[in-house]
Image: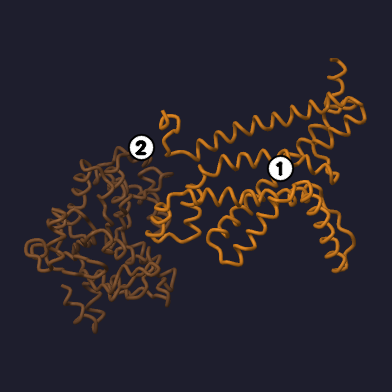
Amino acid sequence: MEQVIELLSLSPPGWGGNLLRGLLHSLEIALGAFGFGLLIGLGGAIGKLYGGPVLRDILAVYTTVVRAVPELVLILILYYVGTDLINKAAGAMGYGRVEISGVAAGIWVLGIVQGAYATEILRGAIKAIPIGQIEAARAFGMPPLKMLRRVTIPAMMSFAIPGLANLWLIATKDTALLAVVGFNELTLETRQAAASTRAYFTFFLAAGALYLMVTLLSGRVFARIEKWARKGQPGHRRAGA
Amino acid sequence: MTEAIATDRNDPAAASAEEAIRVEDLHKSFGNLEVLKGVNMSAKKGDVVAIIGGSGSGKSTMLRCINFLETPTSGRIVIGGEEIAMRADGSPASRKQIERVRSRLGMVFQAFNLWTHRTLIENVTEVPVHVLGVPKAEAHDRAMALLERVGLAEKAATYPAFLSGGQQQRAAIARALAIDPSVMLFDEPTSALDPELVGEVLTVIRDLAAEGRTMLLVTHEMKFAREVSDHVIYLFEGRIEEQGPPEAVFGAPKSERLKQFLKSVA
């Protein structure tokens, strides 16, 4: 037991600090990717619902391909193709090799994956809004962007939150896939700690506990957000009883 | 009053001084189904026009074409002397114009259509504050006065889902009044209500009629239409079959179809 505590202690020779740093990186990327994905998702949902035929086709290809290809493969493609393209572009403009920050690359890669799912979640949520609410906004002369901000987004929230909560949890866990491109998030840090000390069980258990904590905390946060988003709606429990 | 159209047409200034709404040769098709087959009507300021007719007669569609919730297939819509510019497909040509015109038309829907994520007071202040740019405090005071007027002052902080249909519809009327509309458009305002809740909504509408509001009222409530309106339009299969003052339309209908219709709803 003492040995375990020593291994997990925050300062060297313990590896606890590395694990926490990895966790921080993971959360950083998860947050960034989730936010980036939400932006893509909102634009994608609106494009799919109200866009012209060309835009709708492009978005259909995007959501289909991203959701069809395994995330690990996508991450490898997007990461290597992405950095390659940037370097080619930099080379063409006369710059040397560009060092791409792991965090930025991670956010970009996972954000594109998240965006495809978010597009579908938000499209469904917007379609679930009773049409009369949108019609009322139109009937009173509300301009489209204001309608989006004042009516569509708040009214779709309660329909979108459960799906988005799922998506957030997936984001936190998908950060582990970035280990394959050498990004030192929680999983890679754990592997290094485990390999160096041969205490595989201890470290992977510790990492598992950290992921679980993130999930539990996220659950509480989303429960609050959902409660807020559902304001004005009678409770299901009461309605069902 | 409808005869006035012909004489006023050459003198837009005179028309706009008095005229609230004019609809000319309005057509509307849904696919192959022609719902409106050339409707002409007008209303002066202060008029209460009741639009009656069987289901599928096009009465709601006509009302919804006036603020372009439905896109007319062809025709002209003139509101307060201003013609709404239309593209060839009937959609409004200028977003700015249609938004400005809409923000002066107080629409009340059959299904209330209150914003469920906002309290009653927020529903009533929404358009004044966020579309018309009225200062918040001023809009709030006005909204409270309006809720008071429709008997819902104590419910100001309540969300619509927790209210009865009659209360929701009264709140929806307050929301429409909050923009100080030049014309109120009522689209079957009591059709979704339980019978015992109809009265409270009609009382509010009756008050508005009495104070000289310009209103277009699509309704199934014949007694009420007769009581409050200055002019009644009977639509049959997308055309105006008969129109006139309520005493004439209800008391001495000329058209066979109108007679049949009045018998069937009596």
Question: In the displayed structure, would residue A183 be above or below residue A200?
Answer: below
Q: Distance between the Cα atoms at labels 1 and 2?
A: 38 Å
Q: Quadrant of residue B151?
A: top left
- The picture's colour for chain A is orange
Name the chain letter of the residue that bears numbered label 2. B
Give me the residue at 28% from left, 71% from top: B80
Q: Three-letter amino acid code at disc 1?
A: Ala
Q: Quadrant of residue A16?
A: top right
Give me the residue at 42% from left, 39% from top: A232
Between A197 and B248, which is closer to the camera in this rendering?
B248
- The picture's colour for chain B is brown
Which residue is the site of mark 2?
A: B162
For residue A30, the mark is: 1
> In the image, residue B51 lies at what x, y percent?
21, 62
Give me the residue at 19% from left, 61% from top: B50
Name the chain letter of the residue that bears numbered label 1. A
| Mark 1: few/some/many CA within 10 Å (<14, 14-19, 20+) | many
B27 horizontally vs A70: left or right: left
| Mark 2: few/some/many CA within 10 Å (<14, 14-19, 20+) | some
> In the image, residue B86 lies at what x, y percent?
39, 75
